[in-house]
Amino acid sequence: MDQSDVYKTIAGLSEGEYSEKRSKFLAFAHPVHSVDEVKELVEFYQKKYYDARHCCYAYMLGPERKEFRANDNGEPSGTAGKPILGQINSHELTDILIVVIRYFGGIKLGTSGLIVAYRQAASEAIQAATIIEKTIDEEVSFFFEYPFMNSVMRIVKEEEPMLVSQGYDHDCSMTLRIRRSRMPRLKERLSKVETLRFQED
């Protein structure tokens, strides 16, 4: 099966924890779908753990995995957000936010120690998560005359798209959703139905 229209994310909230030289790192992984959601969650953790030294995070959004950010929140540059993002990348995840809260234990960890600690905390949260695969889906809308309903429904039954909506005004209208790799075949079969015309975007 074509895997170009499949991406991996997490099913729900998961947590991880890592300790090093009395510093405590609490990691929280969330499924997210927008930058606004990311901002809300980061704000929530900053308020909840207001007494912690740092609230660092990284996120990745979208099936194409092109929208991402890493934030060190006061830790030396590249020692917190980047290793968290590195864990997201190594597991090929998207639509995910990982927040790591650090309680300072009084002993400095040094640059390499911080990188290891943030990477490990993020890794623990991912290990605890349920990783799921989702498909990139597309929609197609079209109109046809009622006598051709049986022909359309036969294609729908055989190709198994999701029926998003349908209507019966002057013409019949229908919107179907199917994974991207199967859309060309669905459209090709529908285009052979008499009177059927696709709705232009």
Image (cartoon, rainbow, N blue to C red):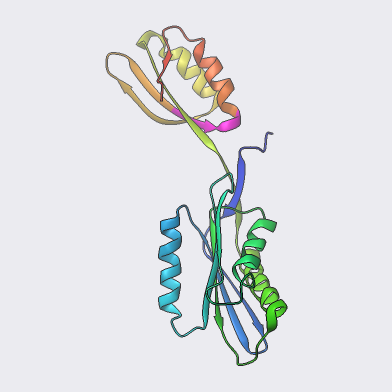
Residue 15 sits in quarter: bottom right
Image coordinates for residue 156, horizontal then vertical, percent: 50, 23
Is the residue 181 above or below the residue 106 in the image? Answer: above
Q: Nearer the viewer, residue 23 or 126?
A: 23
- At 70% from the left and 74% from the top, the residue drawn is 116
Q: Where the C terminus falls, by quadrant?
A: top left
Residue 110 sits in quarter: bottom right
Q: Where the N terminus falls, by quadrant?
A: top right
Residue at far bottom of view:
106
The total number of labels drawn is 0
Segment tinted magenta in the rendering: 176-181
* Relative horizontal placement of residue 158, taking residue 40 as reference (left or right): right
Is residue 180 on the magenta stretch?
yes
Q: Nearer the viewer, residue 70 or 131?
A: 70
- At 41% from the left and 21% from the top, the residue drawn is 200
Q: Nearer the viewer, residue 138 or 132?
A: 138
Image coordinates for residue 81, horizontal then vertical, percent: 59, 68
Is residue 201 on the magenta stretch?
no
Is the residue 48 above or below the residue 13 in the image? Answer: below
* Secondary structure predominantly adopted by residues drawn in magenta: strand
Image coordinates for residue 87, horizontal then vertical, percent: 66, 62
Image coordinates for residue 33, horizontal then vertical, percent: 47, 52
Is the residue 17 above or below the residue 67 in the image? Answer: below
Residue at far left of view:
169
Q: Nearer the viewer, residue 54 or 151?
A: 54
